Image (cartoon, grey):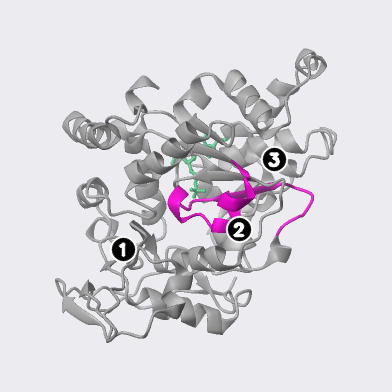
Amino acid sequence: MDIVYGKMLNVVPTTVVSLQSSKNIKVTSSMSISQWSSAPRVPRIVQPRQARVYNALPLVHEARKGGEKDTPLTQQDKYKEIMSNFPRRDDWVLQPLYQYQGFWYFQDYLVGLLAAQENFKPQPSDIVLCTYPKTGTTWLKALAYAIVTRSKFNDSENPLLTKAPHDCVPFLEIDAARNASNRDPEIPLVATHIPYNSLPTSILESGCKLVYLCRDPKDVLISMWHFLRGKLPEGIDKDSYINLNNSFEIFCEGISSNGPYWDHVLGYWKARVESPEEVLFLVYEDLKKDTVSNVKKLAEFMGYPFTPEEEKRGVVQQIIDLCSFDSLRNMKASKSGVYSPDSPYTIRNTEFFRKGTIGDWKNYFSEEMGARLDQIIEEKLNGSGFSFFSH
Ligand code: PAP
């Protein structure tokens, strides 16, 4: 495979202090893409942050030659120009994070998000699977796909046996927004990491059902930390680029891909409180501990409830078994395949399956660090009616 490790990060990070147009329009990162397009061009007033020169490193999603072919170059350039005015942080080293509508995003991902906001047209029956990265997206995709397609395929024909879950359910900001033909119109599922308030208005106006899955933040951070370190070239001292203590501190500050994590959770939780018939809110730990009732809840919510006859035949358990960590991890597609080879987001499927357990954070953080992150999250969620402690 022709992977380019060529994007150099030898840049001096900058922070946008203020942006004022000649017509006195304040330009902020909370503006929508269409507002940006009509805003007059403004000079950048920047203040250099701590000057750091990074070594050449691969992108978070390894860039491939020709990988950006789905999205016209002019559009890519437009988005990159827009985001060059957004507040920026370089803490995670692999790529800059840009702040947009209150959340931080890696540069290539933000291009996809902006394209999704501008272009995505949902099908009326679509169900959107929404997650913060590393909270169980792969598992949720597999379960939802198996539920929705169970009468379409017999047991030996299910595409999950030969295709990775990420190839069965497209990502809105990676596949679907880049090219509408990247999805099968017969499968009403699309997945996204986009926070609730930044979802394309086309989704919010369409009344599509949303399923949200969240996870204990301590395990999310450990999972993400492993994933991002896995993007560093072999043989280098990974701790000098992405070490645990620094990752912990910046995550606690809210600086992480699609973070702050607590705001991501809160956005979907509030939506669920306001419209329980449109938003299902699931927790990874609950799904692990009581998979049967959560899978039934998921099927019911999506409009594909199990019949008593199906329950008697053990269909619920068959789906759970098919989508279990061990089952999916051992599939040929998971062991050898690559996610999204025609886009700039190329990830080996093995990277989506690490341990799949609850509480792995204890092998990395001290009790004090765990308690500190818990306290931060609890304070942020305080008064919302949702707490990770009750799961
Ligand atoms: P993504 O955001 O990049 O799509 P996502 O699937 O959300 O990744 O998260 C990966 C985590 O889910 C991994 O957790 P870990 O690092 O703590 O191990 C992965 O192991 C876990 N995972 C993947 N598939 C399953 C599954 N079938 N059951 C339980 N956990 C799973």
Q: Which residues are magenta?
A: 183-209
Residue underneath mark 2 = 338
Distance (Cα) linking label 3 and label 1: 39 Å
Picture quadrant of residue 52: bottom left
Choose the circle earlier in sequence order: 2 or 3: 3
Amino acid type of the residue that numbered disc 1 sits on in the rendered structure? Ile
Q: Residue at x 21, y 32 (%)?
A: 375
| Magenta span contains residue 367 | no
Amino acid type, residue under disc 2 in the picture:
Val
User: From the image, which quarter does the C terminus lie in?
Assistant: top left
Give residue 145's mark: 3
Q: Amino acid at mark 3?
A: Tyr
Foreground tag (2 vs 3): 3
Mark closer to the observer (1, 2): 2
Q: Residues within 10 Å of mark 1 (few under 14, many from 20)?
A: few
Q: Are marks 2 and 3 in contact (CB under 8 Å)?
A: no
Q: Is residue 85 above or below residue 23?
A: above
In the picture, the disc for residue 236 is 1
Q: Residues within 10 Å of mark 2 (few under 14, many from 20)?
A: some
Give the residue at x 66% y 37%. 144
Q: Alpha-carbon distance for marks 1 and 2? A: 23 Å
From this view, report whether residue 263 is shown above or below residue 79.
Answer: above
Residue 327 is situated, as x and y percent measured from the top left of the image, at 64, 34
Task: Compute the Cα span from label 2 to label 3.
Answer: 19 Å
Q: Mark on residue 319?
A: none
User: Which quadrant of the figure has residue 116?
Assistant: bottom right
